[in-house]
Amino acid sequence: MKVRFHLPDFAGHLKFNLVFATMLRYFPGFFREGVEIASIYGTFPPSVWNGGRLQGGVSDRKFVRNVLDTFNEMGIPLRFTFTNPVIEKKHLSDKFCNMVMSLGNNGMNGVIVVSPILEEYIRTTYPKYKITSSTCKRITDPDALSAELERDYHIVVVDYDFNNKFDILEKIENKEKCELLVNACCEPGCKRRTEHYRAIGEEQIVYCNHVRKYPDKPFNYVDYCKNDESSTHDCQCMNRQLFDIKGLSTHITPDDIWNKYVPMGFSQFKIEGRSTNMLNLIETYLYYMVKPELIDEARYTLFYNLKSNGVIIFNEE
């Protein structure tokens, strides 16, 4: 049995994910049956192609190379969240994004896509990448989902409004290609989700342009967003923590993963958390991947090793 988890943020949560992956390797007894790290997804900032969550910061070539080498040598692929839905042809020549793609073009890593323009460019220019179809496409029709699964994608991340709709999930023929987002914080059936994805994409472009023009001047996200009705700055769903989402109809519990989804033929599960705080991320990883009776011992072991590796768990400011 393989229960393959796709984890958030190889850049911002770099040390955390390295410590957790090492714990999985050396303390396998803590973990539920079959747990594997299928990939770590995210972006190296500032990536104009990035989508799904606004990602700030700056990375250089050396950092990109080191992160790629570190995870790939552990047998863990990186997947780039190049899911900006408002990409135009002029953005395809972006030097930073192309540098990242060139460094990771080894046949092991993947890229998550939404834009047909960007997808075609990547398929043509960097053919070694495994291509994932993003949940940001908002495919909510079962027939459209079936058609997407028939296309040349390594994985299709299913819209999480399908979560727990077993009458639909049971009829999917290519379950092995499906990736289910288990801990979505978005309101089920949200009418603004597509609009928000577009707003985030536009904000990412503005941010990247700002960094290039004014590298020493901070980007004021709040000022940029306050007059934009489509912005996500007023969406409180993005602040939900693990204990806030357990009552949502889209929530998938760990027991359901092993008792329902895996027996049905699903094996790929995504944990979101690129923009969450460290404590919530820790609790989420433990909740989904560690045996319930060993969570306290695993938490202590994880905290100890995070502190030993200089990871700040509690912000004392």
Image: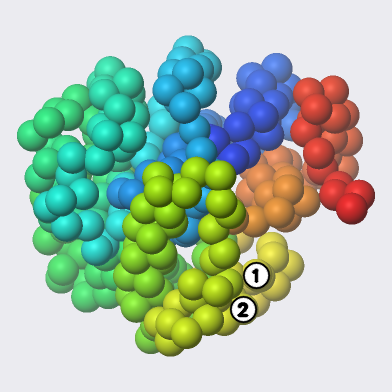
Residue 128, percent across and down? Answer: 19, 25
Front-most of residues 271 and 258: 271
Q: Quadrant of residue 27?
A: top right
Q: Is residue 210 above or below residue 305?
A: below
Find numbered disc 1 in the image and state the secondary structure of the residue it sits on: helix
Q: Residue at 85% across / 30% down in the picture?
A: 307
The circle drawn on residue 239 is 1
Residue type at mark 2 is: Gln
Q: Residue at 30% across / 57% down in the picture?
A: 84
In this rendering, position of residue 176 left or right of residue 225: left
Q: Residue at 78% across / 23% down in the picture?
A: 309
Residue 94, percent across and down? Answer: 25, 40
Dot 1 alpha-carbon crowd within 10 angstroms: few under 14, some 14 to 19, many 20 or more: few
Q: Is residue 301 above or below residue 262?
A: above
Q: Quadrant of residue 240?
A: bottom right
Residue 149, percent across and down? Answer: 18, 53
Residue type at mark 1 is: Asn
Front-most of residues 167 and 222: 222
Q: Residue furthest right?
A: 316
Q: Is residue 257 above or below residue 146?
A: above
Front-most of residues 203 and 118: 203
Q: Residue at 78% across / 33% down in the picture?
A: 311
Residue 218, percent across and down? Answer: 58, 54
Residue contact at pointers 1 and 2, CB within 8 angstroms:
yes
Front-most of residues 264 and 62: 62
Residue under pointer 2? 236
